Image: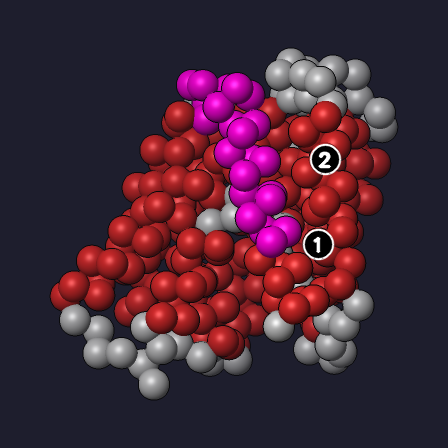
Amino acid sequence: MIAELTFQIYILLFMTGLCAGFVDSIAGGGGLIALPVLFSVGLTPQVALGTNKLQGSFGTLSASYNFIKKGVVRVDENLSGILFTLIGAILGAWVIQQVQAGFVEYLVPVLLLFVFFYTLFTKNLGDVSGSPKMPRHLFFLLFGLGLGFYDGFFGPGTGSFWTAAILIFLGLDMKEASGITRIMNFVSNIVALSVFIIGGNVMYSVGFCMAAGQIVGARAGSSLAIKKGAGFIRPIFLIVVFLTIVRLAWKTYFV
């Protein structure tokens, strides 16, 4: 049963959006903060997920704009990534309505463990730009379709996978990788949000209240990430990936 939405609860929702936007704009994983609060006010799982996509889309848009405005990333260099992520997310959102996530739920914590330990033990990963291991357009073809599909199909950990893939295969620094990740997250979030809206699974009063906080938090977080660079982003990234692994593993293997 949904709680009465008092002024105090709206303040809680705004502050939750602010904190989620701050963390998500730096290292992803804002849903770890937002979803428990959405469940606590009585939203059903479907409505909580849809409302989370609504408020999260504002955060990724705010962070993306900040990264672009301050010259960390350029849209024209990432158009193919935007296109393929959009296509992948549409396909994933369609497929998940036909089948169940199934084995993906068991696979994702294992893959995130790889991301965590690779980032932890690869010296200077993301500190400075390195040599790319594949052409940019090929990278976006493969990972745009693949991670776009995954985000539309299942979703948790998408930002972590994007950041790790960009660091490993494009050789970019952590700051630019975070900026590109936010752009791609925004694209796939919009697709998923459209599916939830069509299904009537969004609570707009809650979503827009949290979105206001998301905009403020994402702007502050992305500004700090741009200013501080890899030394600031890396530990937060590792913490978020670790907490995502714990959350997903507990839900998948123990509940």
Relative placement, left or right, of 206 versus 195 is left
The secondary structure that dominates the magenta segment is helix
- Residue visible at 73% across and 56% down? 108
Q: Position of residue 246 (x, y in %)?
A: 60, 53
Q: Is residue 104 above or below residue 68?
A: below
Residue 177 seen by the camera: yes
> Which residue is identified by label 2?
117
Q: Quadrant of residue 90?
A: bottom right
Q: Quadrant of residue 247?
A: bottom right
Q: Which mark is residue 109?
A: 1
Q: How is the image coloured?
A: secondary structure
Where the N terminus falls, by quadrant?
bottom left
Magenta range: 225-246
| Circle 2: element type | helix
- Residue visible at 54% across and 43% down? 240
Q: In the image, what residue type sits under mark 2?
A: Phe
Q: In the image, what residue type sits under mark 1?
A: Pro
Q: Position of residue 22 (x, y in %)?
A: 39, 40
Question: In the image as oriented, which residue stretches furthest toward the front?
Answer: 254
Q: Is residue 229 magenta?
A: yes
Q: Is residue 6 magenta?
A: no
Residue 88 seen by the camera: no
Q: How many dots with numbers? A: 2
